[in-house]
Image: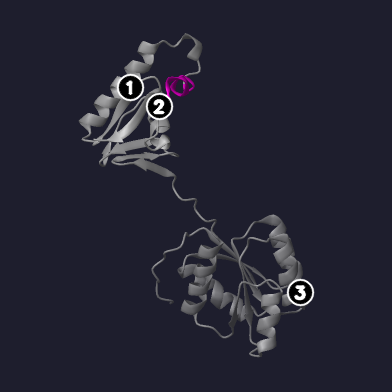
């Protein structure tokens, strides 16, 4: 019985193995299952294409030599059809030309048979990680002690979360983006859909609430009025 290997992969990670040797296919299927992969086996190009029409796979293991065609040519065709799917070539050939042809055909990696299970699974994991779309960096803007997570609409001052209403958040965002420059009352009014019926005391109310919440959080920044212009953030 194969020893259980700690599984750091998602159990549902689906892999298509295109391999004409049934013994190798069985060994890889059993071993990689313990590594957290779910293998579907195709013994020929024709069967591989049928399976690919029925299911999307997260990775393809592809033998160079197949009974009904050339694995490298198949790799080129698969790369055109599935440009984002990692392809790892398997081959008993040791000549450099096979490696070069595989890479030029669109393969992401090449491993010679017989290969160790741990090395194969490590290479597969690496390809899967590389295939993951890059995460967009969190958009966080700040001014002194104030930090605003644009995507999550979270606000903190000196690490203390602030509970802001929608309009308070929008007004503070204007002030933080201004980075110490003044914003006008007209700019603040633009944050209100019903700006035509908003009165000065409404703006003053939002600013008053913001000042209190920043002070309660211990922020050293304050909102100050600029006569004849509007408001700005400044360091205390």
Q: How far from the left and from the top, in percent, is residue 48?
A: 71, 66
Alpha carbons under labels 1 and 2: distance apart: 8 Å
Q: Give the mark nearest the N terminus, 1 or 2.
A: 2
Q: Residue furthest front?
A: 228
- Residue visible at 68% across and 78% down in the picture: 102
At label 3, counting other C-alpha atoms closer than 10 Å, the crowd grade (few under 14, some 14-19, many 20 or more) is some
On the rendered structure, is 170 left or right of 51? left
Q: Secondary structure at mark 2?
A: helix
On the rendered structure, is 110 left or right of 189? right
Residue on which disc 3 sits: 73
Q: How far from the left and from the top, in percent, is residue 59?
A: 59, 65
Residue range in magenta is 183-191
At label 1, counting other C-alpha atoms closer than 10 Å, the crowd grade (few under 14, some 14-19, many 20 or more) is some
Nearer to us in this view, 190 or 94: 190
Q: Is residue 141 above or below residue 175?
A: below
Q: Residue furthest bottom?
A: 95
Q: Is residue 144 above or below residue 93?
A: above
Residue on which disc 1 sits: 207
Q: Is 185 covered by the magenta stretch?
A: yes
Res. 31 visible in picture: no
- Residue visible at 44% across and 45% down in the picture: 139
Q: Are marks 3 and 1 in contact (CB under 8 Å)?
A: no
- Residue visible at 32% across and 16% down in the picture: 205
Which dot, 2 or 3, sits closer to the camera? 2
Residue on which disc 2 sits: 171
Q: Is 80 covered by the magenta stretch?
A: no
Q: How far from the left and from the top, in percent, is residue 14?
A: 57, 61
Q: Give the mark nearest the N terminus, 2 or 3.
A: 3
């Amino acid at each position: 019985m194969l020893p259980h290997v700690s599984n750091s992969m998602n159990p549902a990670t689906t892999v298509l193995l295109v391999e004409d040797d049934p013994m190798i296919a069985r060994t890889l299927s059993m071993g990689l299952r313990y590594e957290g992969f779910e293998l579907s086996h195709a013994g020929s190009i024709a069967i591989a294409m049928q399976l690919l029409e029925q299911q999307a796979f997260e990775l393809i293991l592809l033998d160079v030599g197949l009974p009904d065609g050339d694995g490298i040519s198949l790799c080129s065709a698969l790369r055109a059809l599935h440009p984002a799917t990692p392809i790892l070539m398997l081959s008993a050939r040791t000549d450099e030309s096979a490696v070069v042809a595989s890479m030029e055909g669109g393969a992401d990696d090449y491993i010679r048979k017989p290969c160790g299970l741990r090395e194969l699974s490590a290479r597969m994991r690496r390809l899967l990680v590389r295939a993951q779309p890059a995460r967009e960096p969190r958009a966080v803007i700040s001014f002194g002690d104030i930090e605003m997570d644009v995507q999550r609409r979270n606000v903190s001052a000196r690490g203390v979360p602030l509970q802001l209403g929608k309009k308070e958040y929008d007004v503070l965002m204007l002030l933080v983006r201004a980075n110490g420059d003044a914003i006008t009352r007209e700019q603040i009014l633009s944050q209100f859909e019903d700006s035509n019926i908003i009165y000065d005391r409404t703006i003053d109310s939002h600013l008053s609430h913001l000042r209190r919440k920043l002070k309660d959080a211990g922020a050293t920044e304050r909102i100050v009025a600029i006569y004849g212009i509007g408001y700005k953030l400044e360091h205390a």
